[in-house]
DNA sequence: CGTAGGCTTGAAAAGCGTCAATAGGAGTGG
DNA sequence: CCACTCCTATTGACGCTTTTCAAGCCTACG
């Protein structure tokens, strides 16, 4: 089921898009034929910074990245996390000036594709354009769930929800499943993603551990009771639209 | 500048999309030629409910609507507000099963367009597809700002931010400006949009009034000091991508 | 062996939520 | 024109979740 995981081709993107809409062989070939620059990124390195002009789109080939915004008090809110195969910067590049930053969470490889090439491809091959559009709609769905998560859930629920989302998304990227995975974020980053402080995130994780839902140490998360975690996190994967 | 505001044609949609990408006369005509059902909606009426199958997309011709999600505790989070010209249900209809509800905030008219017709149009006229895609990307940008708003800003800042967003969006829809507008939400709805309680929203509004930033009574908001409100709300309209 | 980054802990304060009661205003019907 | 009702706004007192600040502790790694 897992496609070519060669980290030097756009195969992960094809895999992702083919999941969003039906693509024929020519469509796939056209995506693979996109010109791109391969770039090896370090942990913490910025792909785009807020207010910059973005002229390239970025596809994750390996590693993880986050999108974040900084508010007036200097606090940071992580608004999305991206993994293999995801297009992290269509948003910024199509809208020209970046309204948020994108930064590597771990080391990894990315493919930088000129914006104009993406646009050309979508105009020439409307089905590819449709797949990208649908993918953008799914991103939107995740954003909406995150709004609800930080807006209306308490700390414990928020954290559990995030851990559940990770499990499901990592599974479909072939990087984990409901029994556990490698969590690429530290507690401060979890806090920034859930709108909490690092201290409270720590206490919340302890509460989840104490109740036997998870085991988490040195970046390895073990889900001890998936159903309980799912319930604690008010998690319903519908919004991920994984089975289209 | 304002287009035909006839509330029985898709002109508001053309206006909106033409703002997102360049459309020629044929593109515009094709949009206007989309088959649709005109529907007059009452306040509070649902356009789509969470988990329903959505087969139609909905364009707002007049009035306001909200998207919302309900969490396990029964609390509601409003994740978006829509006004004239906006396509409120591409998200749900392209993704087939609705991951959130859409409901009228005020009475108004909407045009229901079969999903397949939208897809057909975007495949036949990639430029129209591109415009819709960009529009979806802007929606995403607004979602991200809302995540930051409810995740990292305090009550006063959140409310002020929302009031600022309204001013700018209403202005571009020709329904108000930075000096004031008709606010189509009550305090409970403001609370649901900002992730606060109605009581605390009330106190927050009073604080903004006391400081001479706004005047708000019976649904009419007057902005007494735009610069101060903007600052109080940590508001920077970049994320609305209004000047493409 | 020392340092740095991340994790953990405690105590106190703050912000926001909860509960419950009151007030105001618009519309309705007598 | 008044009485009634419904919906929304307002207020007060209290409690709880989360934040803040500050210190200490691990563990990986050079």
Image: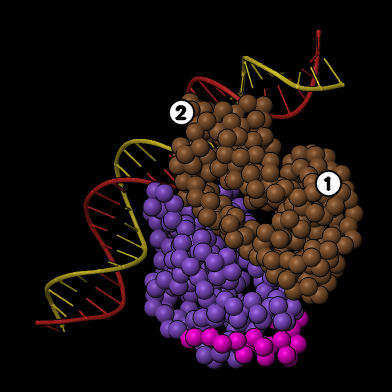
Chain colours: A brown, B purple, C red, D yellow
Residue B156, above or below B31:
above
- Magenta stretch holds residue B32: yes
Q: Position of residue A14 (x, y in %)?
A: 76, 58
**Tags 2 and 1 both on a single chain:** yes
Closest to the camera, between mark 2 and mark 1, is: 1
Tag 1: Cα neighbours inside 10 Å, few (<14), some, or many (≥20)? Answer: few
Q: Which mark is residue A211?
A: 2
- Magenta stretch holds residue B36: yes
One can see residue B213 in this view: no
Residue at (49%, 42%) from the top-left corner?
A230
Residue A72, above or below B228:
above
Dividing the picture into quarters, in which one does residue A36 lie?
A: bottom right
Label 1, on which residue?
A: A6
What is the secondary structure assignment of the residue under circle 2?
loop
Assign the N terminus of chain B to one quadrant of the image: bottom right
Residue at (54%, 66%) from the top-left corner?
B96
- Real-space CA distance between mark 2 and mark 1, rounded to the nearest whole angstrom: 40 Å
Residue B161, above or below A172:
below
One can see residue A100 in this view: yes
Instruction: Find the magenta span and give its range.
Output: B17-38
């Amino acid at each position: 089921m897992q496609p070519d995981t060669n980290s030097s081709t756009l195969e992960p993107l094809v895999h992702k898009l083919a999941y969003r809409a039906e693509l024929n062989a020519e469509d796939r070939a056209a995506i693979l034929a996109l010109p791109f620059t391969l770039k090896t990124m370090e942990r913490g390195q910025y792909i785009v910074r807020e207010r910059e002009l973005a002229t390239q789109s970025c596809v994750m080939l390996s590693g993880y990245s986050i999108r974040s915004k900084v508010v007036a008090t200097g606090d940071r809110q992580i608004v999305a996390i991206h993994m293999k195969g995801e297009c992290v910067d269509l948003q910024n590049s199509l809208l020209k000036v970046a309204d948020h930053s994108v930064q590597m969470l771990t080391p990894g490889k990315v493919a930088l594709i000129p914006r104009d090439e993406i646009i050309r491809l979508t105009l020439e091959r409307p089905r590819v354009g449709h797949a990208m559009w649908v993918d953008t709609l799914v991103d939107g769905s995740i954003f909406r769930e995150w709004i609800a998560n930080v807006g209306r859930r308490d700390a414990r629920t928020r954290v559990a929800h995030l851990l559940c989302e990770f499990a499901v998304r990592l599974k479909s990227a072939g990087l984990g499943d409901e029994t556990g995975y490698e969590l690429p974020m530290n507690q401060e980053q979890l806090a920034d993603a859930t709108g909490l402080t690092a201290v409270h995130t720590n206490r919340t994780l302890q509460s989840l551990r104490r109740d036997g839902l998870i085991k988490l140490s040195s970046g390895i998360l073990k889900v001890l009771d998936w159903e309980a975690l799912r319930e604690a996190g008010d998690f319903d994967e519908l919004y991920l639209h994984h089975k289209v």
